[in-house]
Image: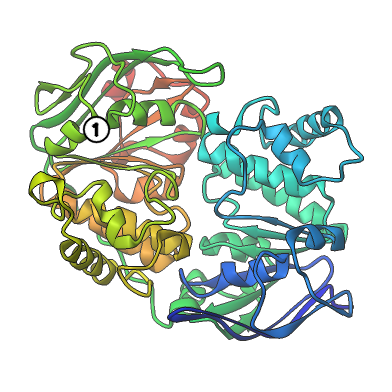
Amino acid sequence: MTRLELIGITKQYPGVRANDGIDLKVSPGQIHAILGENGAGKSTLMKIIYGATRPDAGQVAWNGREVEVASPAQARQLGISMVYQHFSLFDTLTAAENIWLGLDKAQSLAEVTERTRAVSATYGLHVDPARPVHTLSVGERQRVEIIRALLTKPQLLILDEPTSVLTPQAVESLFVTLRQLSSEGCAILYISHKLHEIRSLCHHCTVLRAGRVVGEVDPQQETNASLSRLMIGADAPTLTAREGRRGAPVLRVAGLSLPQQDPFGITLKDIGLEVAAGEIVGVAGVSGNGQQELLAALSGEDARAATGTLRLFEQDISHAPPGRRRIAGLHFVPEERLGRGAVPTMSLAMNTLLTRTEAVGPGGWLRQGVARRLAERLIERFRVKAPGPDAPARTLSGGNLQKFIVGREIDASPRLLIVAQPTWGVDVGAAAQIRGELLRLRNQGCALLVFSEELDELFEICDRLHVIAQGRLSPSLPIATATREQVGEWMSGLWPMEEAVDAQA
């Protein structure tokens, strides 16, 4: 018996055919990977299955019967649940209230709260049900989405980049959950750019390119290289990282302590770090351990730091607003793409104005032609799949929007670049491109501070590494002597005195 069958699914948007005659079959208990580059049509196809988007042509069959899935509510009634790459949560509601909205209202909010706590504990997806969503980090919001989906007890679970901001330990816990669901007959559609995850977890893999099916394979019989070739039609670009030449200090943070701004925030405790020209310093850690608070203090969004605790090129910037820090050479890429990195309804051209001033003339007049040419340059240089500079940011796939936002700041030739989750949700080719651009910046003398929950990424590009846990920052650890096991231990806040680390290094 087939749980889900798609026949000839086609969806056309202005300037792009997202899905072009796609056929797909998913069996009960099967963990079925959907693999493809950014913009290949994966998310559009999943939204069609979930009823969030209507196809222009094609049929959907559910448990052997043709159906028309007109809305997510109807999809959930059928037994289809989805975890989006871009979260569908209400910021002003609590985690439990957001979960309750997607469930049968026969259950009370109190019952859903208790079930949330139970599932959270069982599957290692820690979430406080009482916390408002606007106080949660990206990783914590993703856990809310996953828990909400699991509580529906779905027959088909769609996961769009579910592990992009989870730690390796949390990923393993999630995989245990997914294998258990599979053994109980739940079919799973799994989208990920992490090829090793697909090979480890999935039973079958359908590969999309430019909106079409270009291959179907057993991922456990493939290599990362062969899957990459199927996905992008060529070998993935290789990344060569030579050691940087460390120059003069650019950013100094000394004794930075900030009390939490809301009841669910994290207090920063005596943070100290230094980033020099020509080096990449990484910050690893489990989501929700103070990354948001430290990033806000560094970017200027939170200007409560004590005088002298933040210095850029030896100038005190502790109370400087973001604009003044940008003029001094500090550029910043937030972890949230839509809403902070870009305004969803604005065109790509207008989104360049958020951090770039080239298109602002005397008296504050906008030079729209300059903004459009800048957006065109970014689209071309960073191979962003978009109809053009007038495309609204919300119409881009998550990975392509990430390339545009990161590219916008890299293209500004910053003297200090602070970036959070630089390759979240991008395919292997785009991830290699972004990491290569970061290394190129470093080799040109830029100082970079990279916050990432991808340990492989940090080990690949960083010269030194810190770990953040419960608002405290570990001593610096040279990548040359670091191990993943050691960093994993430090994520629990268990690190030695700085003198011992220095002696070891």
454 lies left or right of 358 = right
**Vertical side of 173 occupied by 371: above or below:** below
302 lies left or right of 371 = right
> What kind of residue is marked 1?
Pro
At 82% from the left and 34% from the top, the residue drawn is 112
Image quarter hosting the N terminus = bottom right
Q: Position of residue 275 (x, y in %)?
A: 20, 32
Residue 241 in sight? no
At 35% from the left and 60% from the top, the residue drawn is 403
Colour scheme in use? rainbow
At 44% from the left and 54% from the top, the residue drawn is 344
**Vertical side of 241 occupied by 328: above or below:** above
Q: Position of residue 315 (x, y in %)?
A: 10, 22
208 lies left or right of 309 = right
Q: Circle 1 sits on which residue? A: 322
**Vertical side of 92 occupied by 221: above or below:** below
Q: What element does badge 1 sit on?
A: helix
Q: Position of residue 232 (x, y in %)?
A: 43, 78
**Vertical side of 165 occupied by 2: above or below:** below
At 70% from the left and 86% from the top, the residue drawn is 58
Quarter where residue 8 is shown: bottom right
Q: Position of residue 195 (x, y in %)?
A: 53, 64
Image quarter hosting the C terminus = top left
Assess disc 1: are there few (<14), some (14-19) or many (≥20) residues with their C-alpha within 10 Å of its C-alpha.
many
